[in-house]
Amino acid sequence: MAYITATYQLGVTDQLPKRAEQIALGLTVGSWTDLNHLEQQQLESFKGQVVHTEEHDGKGYVTIRYPEHNVSRDFSAILTTVFGKLSLDGQIKLTDLQLPATFTPDFPGAKFGIEGVRQLIQVHDRPLLMSIFKGVIGRDLVFLREQLEAQLAGGIDLVKDDEILYDNPLTPALDRARIGREVLDAHYERTGKRALYAITLSGPVFRLKEQAKRLVEAGATALLLNTFTYGLDVLRELAADPEIPVPIFNHPALSGALIASPEYGIAAPVLLGTLPRIAGADLTLFPSPYGNVALAKDLARGIAVEATRIGETKTILPVPSAGIHPGLVAQLVRDFGVDSVINAGGGVHGHPQGAAAGVIAFRQALDAALAGESLTSAAHRHEELRVALDAWGITK
């Protein structure tokens, strides 16, 4: 028999084995000792089983496995079973979740993953560079086109909409897809370099598939989904649809409500690493350890570990975000490695010489970091990098 396995952090350590058994029963058959022998035999294969309990640092940790046949093959059933009502029961946090290999046909993961995205843009040997549209709300399509052209002119690999740029009268999503494709194709004809532009997918949930297909037909090369406002099963359905043949970027909007507390909710590596990878995202964004909206470094790196975990699904690209500027590039490479995305908004658009120079400064910083050269040394040869370091400094 196959099992879903979950690990929890509890705020109490007294009578931990008993508490673990209560959880295992409460989320499956409900009770055990009150059942007669025949009923126990009948329900044995549905009963949650305690795998491990331990105490450290004043907290309790329990691992429980749940029979696969207790749930239907969707995230709603899985998360309700392992953490639904339990999430309301005091200080408890879901810190790990593993699905059995038998679930792979229903949870195949990303269409593209790390290697697929790299193949699309033909960049295989370094972290990818991504920039974000900024200040587009309230502006028109002319402004959007100019901003996209400027980001591409610097040599960016990926561009994404701001997550709050929905379908709207001034910059309709279908027009963004059409213009984006025109600009991307012109950039390719001029430079031989492919890039992707992720458009925010928005609208009523039951129309999202239709909207995604319309965006692809209009020219969209990638999609950005606010997964946690729609649900993981929405991401899974979009990723599994062969008529949506573009990478999907998972945005962490609303996830802070679930990951922020050290005592409650879902651990950041699970919510922003494990679950998006299983659900089918090709990239997963999360707060970097460096900005104003920062995650602790161990949690941010934990997300990257889960995103790139080798297993039944493709590995996906971790995207530490917020507060990123060229002076952080060497630190990003050290912390997240080659299979990651360096993502910046203000660090590109805030460059004193403009967005194109901002992208160039990132590329100069990245080349230096990969070559083992200090950013200070590289700045002596590269004006764009020097100006960026003057503006933001270097994080060591």
Image (cartoon, rainbow, N blue to C red):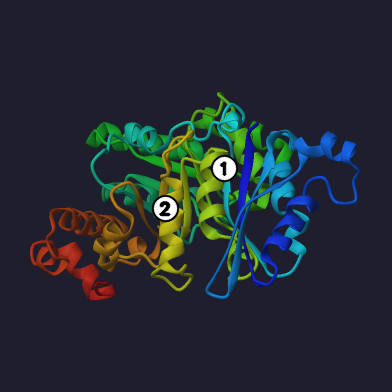
Looking at the picture, does residue 8 appear above or below residue 29? below
Name the residue type under label 2.
Ala
Please give the count of numbered marks on the rendered protein: 2
* Image-quadrant location for residue 78: top right
Against 136, residue 180 (above or below) is above
Q: List x then y, in percent, for residue 384.
A: 19, 63
Amino acid at the residue labelled 1: Ala
Position of the N terminus by quadrant: top right
Q: CA distance from mark 2 to mark 1?
A: 30 Å
Secondary structure category for the residue under label 2:
helix
Kindly indicate the quadrant of the structure image that contains residue 255.
Answer: bottom right
Q: Is residue 336 visible?
A: yes
Residue 14 lies, with reference to residue 62, above or below; the image says below
Name the residue beneath numbered marker 2. 304
Q: What x and y, as percent, mark residue 261?
A: 60, 70
Query: Which image quarter holds the C terminus?
Result: bottom left
Pointer 2 with pointer 1, Cβ within 8 A: no
128 on left or right of 80: left
Extreme residue in the top direction: 242
Side of 183 relative to 285 (left or right):
left
Q: Residues within 10 Å of mark 1 (few under 14, many from 20)?
A: many
Return the residue at label 1: 173
* Residue 349 at x, y percent in the picture: 36, 62
**Residue occupying image coordinates x 64% and y 71%:** 13
**Horizontally, is 23 left or right of 321 in the view?**
right
Sooner in the amino-acid sequence: mark 2 or mark 1: 1
Residue 221 is situated, as x and y percent measured from the top left of the image, at 45, 35
Mark identifier at residue 194: none
Residue under the image location 67 percent in, 65 percent down: 16
Please tell me whether mark 1 sits on a helix, a strand or a loop: helix
Q: Is residue 133 visible?
A: no
